[in-house]
Amino acid sequence: MHRPLFRGAPMQAIGSTGGEDRLPQVRVDPFAMQTVVAGILEAHDVPPDDAAIVARCLGRADLRDVMTHGVSRLPHYTKRLRAGLINPRPELAPRRPTPVASHLDGQNGFGFVTATRAMDEALDIAGTLGFGLAAVCRSTHFGMAAVYVLQAVEAGYACCVFTNASRATPPWGGRTPMFGTSPLAFGFPTASEAPFVFDMSTTTAARTKVREAERLGQDIPEGYALDADGAPTTDPRAALQGSMLPIGGPKGSGLAMVMDIFAGVFTDAAFAGGVRNMYDDFDQPQNVGHLIMAFQPDLFAAGTAKRMDELVHAVHASPTAKGVDRIRLPGERGHAEERRRSSAGIPYRSGDLAAVLSLAAAHDVAVPDHWPLALADGA
């Protein structure tokens, strides 16, 4: 049964742009949302198990407050499904050229599915040999890289996750975008503390944040991007026509190139500007590449999870700089937010909720009665 999102706010009054931030947000049960998202994907011919993986990956991004990589992207994925640019039913058959390595042709399937399978492969190999390497070609956008890091650390393994991405930043000294924002992520399990989860873009911000600012009519911070003429800009529209700035100048540019080499050249995926843009390029599939590594954390020293706890305690005990109340390690804030939102619900913007409900209604996907929990804090 479909229910209205807000008390006193009829669905037809809710748009996807403009004034949506002035309407109250609603906390939605995260597992109800995943059920609806999976149902929408199944209506697009995605098998139930794969639909559940995609829904879980999107939902986990929202749980950890990385909303730019969560359910708000669903309309873009379904649009590419309908255009035949995402294969809903890839027949994934990894091959192992050596005992320690696995290569997976993603067949243009969901990056969430291919990357999850690749991490499964890396973990399976690492469980026997201590280290596992998995490469993926012909994949698509895989969302938040930390999802696959968490897959490993929650199984008790350390890991590295690399991917390349569509054109966003030029080689250092250039003006034409060639390399992607190409995130790299690392994880290490702990004994009792939040696991170490480091996930970063090679540019000052993920390009999705610029698209979100454009959608909401907001400026972007200085230092994010250049316009098409190579001049600094705070206008997201100009930034999307221009290029993203790398972190640390030539160092970030070099890292973007490294990601393109290891996740593109090495894996047999697209590279050097060949990865297609998920939002704008509808002439052919993306051909994204991923490279995933998993390690047994105790290969060289016993009790590394407890040693990680010691590191965490040492960092927390370090004297803080002026104006800093507490030092946090990578992954701590997301871990705490995930625990809180799992029970309190995820605060969604009206436009994002309207888009999901519109897709659900169009494909006769039922919305659970416990969908809205409450108005979000401060609404």
Image: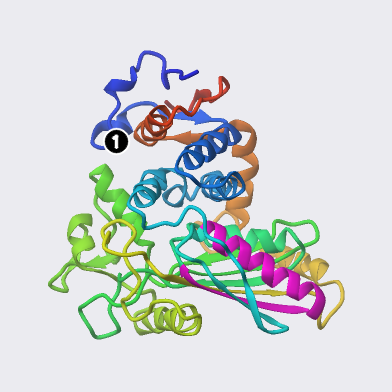
Could you tell me residue 84's position as x and y percent? 36, 54
Residue that numbered label 1 is attached to: 16
Q: Is residue 196 left or right of residue 361?
A: right
Placement of 116 over or under 76, stated as above or below: below
Which of 99/68 is in front? 99
Q: Say which residue appears at 17% left-offset and 67% top-offset.
A: 227
Residue at the outermost right position: 302
Q: Say which residue appears at 38% left-offset and 62% top-offset.
A: 206
**Image quarter of the C terminus:** top left
Residue at the outermost left position: 229
How many numbered badges does the structure rendering display? 1
Placement of 178 over or under 188, stated as above or below: below
Indicate yes or no whether the magenta region holds residue 129. yes
Placement of 243 over or under 151, stated as above or below: below
Q: Say which residue appears at 40% left-offset and 27% top-offset.
A: 361
Could you tell me residue 143's position as x and y percent? 48, 57
Magenta part of the chain: 112-138
Q: Is residue 190 left or right of residue 89?
A: right
Q: Secondary structure at mark 1?
A: loop
Indicate yes or no whether the magenta region holds residue 344. no
Q: Is residue 346 left or right of residue 150?
A: left
Could you tell me residue 120's position as x and y percent? 68, 65
Could you tell me residue 5's position as x and y percent? 42, 22
On the image, which quarter does residue 233 sit in? Answer: bottom left
The answer to whether any part of residue 352 appears in the image is yes
Which of 114/21 is in front? 114
Which of 217/314 is in front? 217
Placement of 130 over or under 90, stated as above or below: below
